[in-house]
Image (cartoon, rainbow, N blue to C red):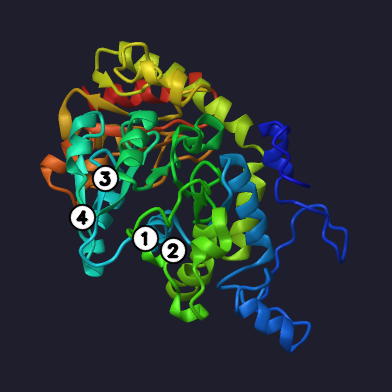
Amino acid sequence: MSADPTYGFDTLQIHAGARPDPATGARQVPIYQTTAYVFRDADHAAALFNLQEVGYIYSRLTNPTVAALQERIATLEGGAGAVCCSSGHAAQIMALFPLMSPGMNVIASSRLYGGTVTQFSQTIKRFGWSATFVDFDDHDAVKAAIDDNTRAVFCEAIANPGGHITDLDAISAISDEAGIPLIVDNTSATPYLCRPIEHGATLVVHSTTKYLTGNGTVTGGCVVDSGKFDWAANDKFPSLSEPEPAYHGLKFAETFGPLAFTFHGIAIGLRDLGMTMNPQAAHYTLMGIETLSLRMDRHVENAMKVAKWLEDDPRTDYVTYAGLPSSPYAKLVPKICPKGAGALFTVAVKGGYDACVKLVDSLEIFSHVANLGDTRSLIIHSASTTHRQLTAEQQEAAGAGPGIVRLSIGIEDADDLIADLDQALAKATA
């Protein structure tokens, strides 16, 4: 079906990108488990390789199952196009790849998933790129950090692990003034709770592994292109605005307009980096998205109940859930996440590091895993796991200090989750 903007979210999450299979009439999107596609003739093949015609060449680049997922996510985010890839970390590199060159930098929020902090502070140095980490609550600091070599601003809509909400309107105003794109990781919020493009984001990235799939079965990532950024407005983005030697001097911005970034991501990014999403993973994620709104409503409802209970419990020092009236981010919820503040937050446990370890080991319903966004409730002690590679200062800046655990609240019975936390806290703080 067409991505008719008049359709509601619940309709689009089921139908966007999905069409009956033309060969068999299959109603569910088939898994096209093939590496290559037969060309009609030599002219057809040449046109595909010259980007003069859209179609399928090789599954490192394009695949019908993955294409359906790309269309669905782009539609839900309100974007012009999307490129799916092998993981959320792959999506971050895919987003930066057309923008950066040796000597260039990205301004990143200090409140990011620990793996992202490591990727930005260590790994991207091998490309000659660098990252400057800033507290995105301090808008003046964000503005001051941007220099002539800055090529992107990066943040999370709902930050992992603390659930802090970013004022995307304020940050996008800063990036717009500087003439550079804002990249927003929307993994923790999903397009059901937050649509970053409506708040000025240029690109949206996802770890589709998390809430979009929702069942902890496959890894994947996605980059959504808003189609609203003028890549040729200045000379900062030659990969998109200048002639591309590999395609006989084609200029992506000139040739593809609002889809310039999307086509570059496929024709250059996937071609050369090879961070391909496999069709079976795309199929699992397509099925997961069909129930996204139903799951997110329950995630938010449960998170609010559990967070309120934990906040009132004398065995905890504080809870960072933005949906609580006591949160300094509560005022941003109606503007950025009007349907709820998500289901990810941290809890400071009295007794510090040792109490956190005992808590994790004493839980029965909560699973101790390095994941979030599952239907199951999950817990992790970030300081000893996901953020272990960071310095003490970086851990504190990210909201992942030694006395803190991260909770990802699932869709079980909230009373059962509270009872599980109650008995585990009793053992942890005895």
Tags 1 and 3 touching, CB below 8 Å? no
Q: CA distance from mark 3 to mark 4?
A: 10 Å
Of the image marks 3 and 4, the number of the one nearer the N terminus: 3
Q: Quadrant of residue 56?
A: bottom right
Q: 347 and 277: which one is in front? A: 277
Q: Circle 1 is placed at which residue position? A: 237
Residue 151: % across, % down: 30, 54
Residue type, label 2: Leu
Q: Circle 2 is placed at which residue position? A: 240
Q: CA distance from mark 1 to mark 3?
A: 19 Å
Q: What mark, if any, has residue 121 been given in the picture?
A: 4
Residue 357: % across, % down: 24, 37
Tags 3 and 2 touching, CB below 8 Å? no
From the image, which quarter does the C terminus lie in? Answer: top left
Residue type, label 1: Phe
Residue type, label 4: Ser
Q: Nearer the viewer, mark 1 or mark 3?
A: 1
Q: CA distance from mark 2 to mark 1?
A: 6 Å
> Which residue is drawn at the image coordinates 50% and 65% (left, top)?
252
